[in-house]
Image (spheres, rainbow, N blue to C red):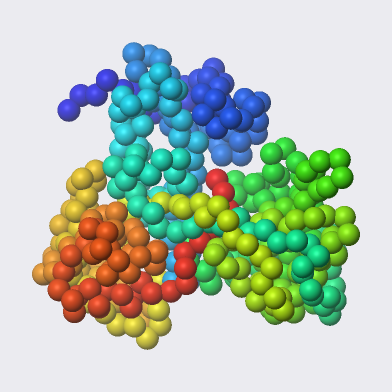
Amino acid sequence: MSTPFDIGPPRDERELEQFGKIASEAFVVAPERFRPYFDAAGRGNFRFVRRDGALVGGLAILPKGQWFGGQAVPMAGIAVVAVPPEHRAGGVATELLSAVLRELYDGGCSLSTLYPATVALYRRAGYELAGVSCEVTLTAKSIDLRDRTLAVRAATPDDEPQIRAVYRQAAARTAGNLDRSEFNWWRVREQRGEKTQAYVVCRGPTVEGYAYLLSQSVDMAHANLRVLDMAAVTPEAARRVLTLIADYRTIRDQVIFRSGPFDPLLMHLAEVPATAVGRTPWMTRIVHVPRALAARGYPAGVAAELHLDVRDEVLAENNGRWVLHVADGHGEVHPGGRGTLAVHVRGLAALYTGFLTPAELVLAGLASGPAPDLAAAAAPFAGPTPWMRDAF
């Protein structure tokens, strides 16, 4: 079927500049701030939509991975989806998303994840709420740790490989944290044009933890400390990272960072002084059903055979019956089977990340099936609450 839209990569710098103005208005960000974003994301990773030769919207595709069950699943992050006000409600974003999803499917991508400005639009494209990203706030003075067992120092470029190894080890234990691309590490090192200060926690020459910190003024008399990223792979390193942050207590008021509903590092505090606010949801789309189900890890010791009947109105290849065999922490997928567990591709996304249980999907109208089949589908996807520290 013909479409009035032309969708593809940027044609020239003029189009990039034009889209920067569109995105600037949509996200209330100065247009010049998008130039480094374009550079970091890669100009070839943008897709623009045109009608009658005029640019009427665009988005960025950010290749990366996302950790589920101890495996980094290839994922395309979707960002800066922007359509000018005069072209909204005309199917522009829907056409753009459909074209991008087709491109991702044909290119072998398993998943796509995004932070929605509006949930309804992305649900029409097959995305569903699948995890959270909370903003955690606590006063610097409330951090009651003073553990200086391990050394801490300013990070150097030579520490980068060990920092990334610590992050990867910590992220692999979660559900939903990113297997970061260079773009995401750029976002950690720089926040809105300001450079962060990186520190490493060391046991001899070995880095066991780190923190990227940025001071932000509130007014003439007050400033807060934003933690752009922190991770630790040992209890001692976790306590030393928190002690480093606590040492800002005389010159910084609030400590702010992104986390899940409760960050495990805070288990080292005697009290619970933190508040998690702004539970920003993220949405995930199963781009390629068999590839995605085979790519993630599963709990050790769980054996299951699920007979799925998937419904997907956008990517027809995902429709139909699939059998998922889970054993020894891995999954294998084959077409066919009895199809006793009917699930919409949106519901499959929420099940895949561990955000909703099969019973909750039934309540949401996204799945149906006999009680034994619903119960069998719970164990393979059980795990920690899916959350993400990164924004993109």
Q: Is residue 175 left or right of residue 180?
A: left
| Place of residue 218 in the rendered image (x, y in percent of width and height, measured from the top left) | 78, 43
Name the foreground residue: 327 vs 251.
Answer: 251
Q: Quadrant of the N terminus?
A: top left
Image height of 336 relative to 31, above or below: below
Residue at horizontal 50 percent and vertical 44 percent from the top: 62
Q: Quadrant of residue 200?
A: bottom right
Residue at horizontal 56 percent and vertical 39 percent from the top: 41
Q: Is residue 167 left or right of residue 93?
A: right
Residue at horizontal 66 percent and vertical 65 percent from the top: 274
Residue 249 is at least partly visible in this image = yes
Q: Quadrant of the C terminus?
A: top right
Image height of 78 relative to 377, above or below: above
Residue 45 is at least partly visible in this image = no
| Place of residue 289 in the rendered image (x, y in percent of width and height, measured from the top left) | 28, 58
Q: Quadrant of residue 240?
A: bottom right
| Place of residue 253 in the rendered image (x, y in percent of width and height, measured from the top left) | 80, 55
